[in-house]
Amino acid sequence: MVTAAFIIFGLAAIVSAIMVISFRNPMASAIALIVTLCSIAGLFAIMGATFVAALQVIVYAGAIMVLFLFVIMLLNLKRDEFGPEKRKIQRTLGIILGLLLVLEVGIFIQAGLGDFGPSPAGDKGSFTSITELSSLLFTKYLFAFEVTSLLLLVAIVGAVILAKKKL
Amino acid sequence: MPVPLGYYLGLAAIIFTVGVIGVLVRRNAIIILMSIELMLNGANLTLVAFSVHLQELSGQVFVFLVMTVAAAEAAVGLAIIVMIFRNRESVNVDNLNIMKW
């Protein structure tokens, strides 16, 4: 059952990720990216990390993708406004280097698949509780959490200043 | 985890690679930003897989932080794209050669 879910979500994630980078229309790419993000949320859920799965759907597929869609509609980009690729060599080189990376991953998987051994802590099944996660977040990683809020403030101010015509 | 860790790592690596190819091949700045999101998601999948495998919650806290950084990056990046489009009427990164020697 879990294996079947893994295969379905994994295939959906890979196929829609390839669709993201192959569509000419940015809007179609954004929709495909939403499918990828939701599939990855499903993978998180079958791993037992339910809180992260919920965050993935709410923050990524919800907030960030709405931002992307909003900007695509704001700029009113037509499909394939760039014409044919000017730099063939760049495109071929990119695909070759990407396939090389796939090959390296294949070698890694060949060498390491299932070699990580059993989980050192034993299999306790679903172990994520929001209580544990939040207590870790607000004690050990409190500083990182606060710095994150500062980063978000800087991002808000920066985005407003960059995108506004005149202040 | 009934599915071995290696499968999750392989899947995450494939998604990351697709993102890399997108950044290298596409010329549309918005799609390049989306490819960066794909790469961040591949890294997140690796973090959660190891977190569940090692029964250690720190990995999931890091996923939380990575999501925040991704949100900030998307906001600033899209603001930059809007500004560039306003100045040059294009989001093709080949046209943005003003800082190239």
Image (cartoon, helix red, strand yellow):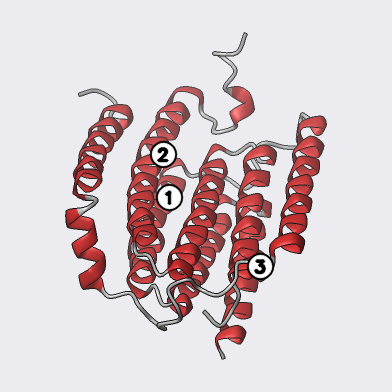
Residue topped by disc 1: A68
**x 34%, y 64%: residue:** B57
Label 1 residue SS = helix
Q: Nearer the viewer, residue A66 or B77?
A: B77
Residue A88 in which image quadrant: top right
* Mark drawn on residue B78: 2
Q: Quadrant of residue A153?
A: top left
Q: Can residue A24 be spotted in the picture?
A: no
Chain of the residue displaying label 3: A
B64, A33: nearer the viewer:
B64
Identity, as a three-letter code, of the amino acid under mark 3 = Asp
Q: Chain letter for mark 2, please.
A: B
In the image, which disc is placed on residue A115?
Answer: 3
**Label 2 near label 1: C-beta < 8 Å?**
yes
Give the vertical position of B68 relative to A81 (above or below).
below
Please state if A44 lies on the left or on the right of A50 as rendered. right
Q: Are dots 1 and 2 on a single chain?
A: no
Q: Find the distance from the CA under tag 2 to the CA under tag 3.
A: 42 Å
Left or right: A160, with A49 as reference point? left
User: As drawn, which residue projects farthest toward the top?
Assistant: B101
Q: Are marks 2 and 3 in contact (CB under 8 Å)?
A: no
**Residue A142 image position (x, y, % from top left):** 19, 49
Question: Label for residue A85?
Answer: none
Question: To which chain does the residue with label 1 belong?
Answer: A
Q: Residue at x 76, y 58 (%)?
A: A106
At x 66%, y 71%, the residue is: A114
Above/below status of A165 relative to A77: above
Q: How many residues crowd around disc 2 within 10 Å: few (fewer than 14), some, or many (20 or more)?
A: many
Of the residues tagged 2 and 3, which is closer to the observer?
3
- Mark 3 and mark 1 in contact? Answer it, CB < 8 Å: no
Q: Amino acid at mark 1?
A: Phe
Chain-order first, disc 3 or disc 1 = 1
